Amino acid sequence: MPVAMPVVLRAKCVVVGDSTVGKSALTQVFHSDGTHFPKAYSMTIGVELCVKSVNIPETSNSVELYIYDSAGKEMFSDHVQQMWDSPSLAVVVCDLANEKSLSSCVKWLERVKAKAGRDIHAVLVGNKTDLDTRRVVTAEMAQKAAAGMEVVYFECSAKERENVEAPFYFLANAFYKQYQEKVAMTESLCE
Amino acid sequence: MFDVALSGAGAKVVLTTSSDENYPPENMLDGKAESFWISTGMFPQEFVISFAGMMNVSKIKLSCFHVRGLSIQRSVQKEPLDFEVIDERELTPSDASLQLEEFKFDETTARHMKFIIKSGFDHFVSVHKLNIDGTAVREAE
């Protein structure tokens, strides 16, 4: 029997959150498989695009994530939102050493959802677990915020390369499942 | 007048921007609404149909699902090049059944047609049946 050609899905994954929470660090550490952590801060202007393929376990299929690492500075807000047409997925990032960055997350998710016009899979990521002495956002606070936003919560340290893949893998798998459900639904529609 | 977009009439899908071999592009040209081609994520998506020869196209009937912005273009060149827009519109949403859309043209010739799906009502969109009414244009040797 011939081997089936793998299916490659494509998802537009928008990374949002206040400035300096570590969106670019998270994106770049994930994109480089942990080999590149941007040590010096460089403000993102507009949107930076990274493409990363995620294999779906127990299949030969994959999801190509088109990661839109978006500027967090309010000054660029109108500009970056123009790049968010038809988003598939959202990663909302906050800094665990900055309580205000957590409360902004609701606003960021709403902005992405407004561009989608429908519910999309999203995650809340608490970054900088390495700053344990300066940490002000507890896991409970973040969990509660995530529950309010109806998303799953992940904690990571881009600097220490800890748990950086988990939120992206989660979203890629959720997107893959969404595709399977859509295919099944479309099939049942034309029976 | 006959369906010039049927595989049986010599039409071929020469390009699609998504591929899942369980739902191949040929499904759009088999005359059946049950089988379909489905996009695998993100927009825009497009596909190009090449006819057996130059055709005079009068009507297109499209069965699809969750397609929103659609642009239809034609090319009269031997190769699928120099496309020009012949219709562009937002389709009506439909959640529990397929969308059935009709596009009418007068005196429109085409050797190739490109369909650009600019946006959708969902992450993934499917095209089930493409019916193009037309006649072959007599061509000088």
Image: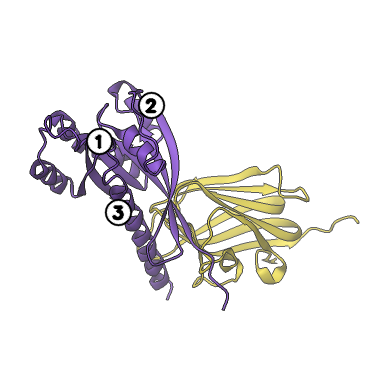
Chain colours: A purple, B yellow
Q: What residue did someone put label 3 on?
A: A170
Which residue appears at 25% of the width and 46% of the height? A123
Amino acid type assigned to the residue bearing label 2 in the image: His
Q: Residue A108 bears which disc, if any?
A: 1
Q: What residue did someone put label 2 on?
A: A79
Q: Secondary structure at mark 1?
A: helix
What distance separates the C-alpha of mark 3 from that of mark 1? 20 Å
- Residue B118 in picture, x, y percent from top left: 49, 46
- Residue A128 in picture, x, y percent from top left: 21, 35
Image quadrant where residue A75 sits: top left
Amino acid type assigned to the residue bearing label 3 in the image: Phe
* Callouts 2 and 3 close, C-beta under 8 Å: no
Question: Between A120 and A39, which is closer to the camera in this rendering?
Answer: A39
What distance separates the C-alpha of mark 2 from that of mark 3? 28 Å
- Which marked residue is nearer to the observer: mark 2 or mark 3? 3
Q: Relative to residue A66, is residue B138 drawn left or right?
A: right
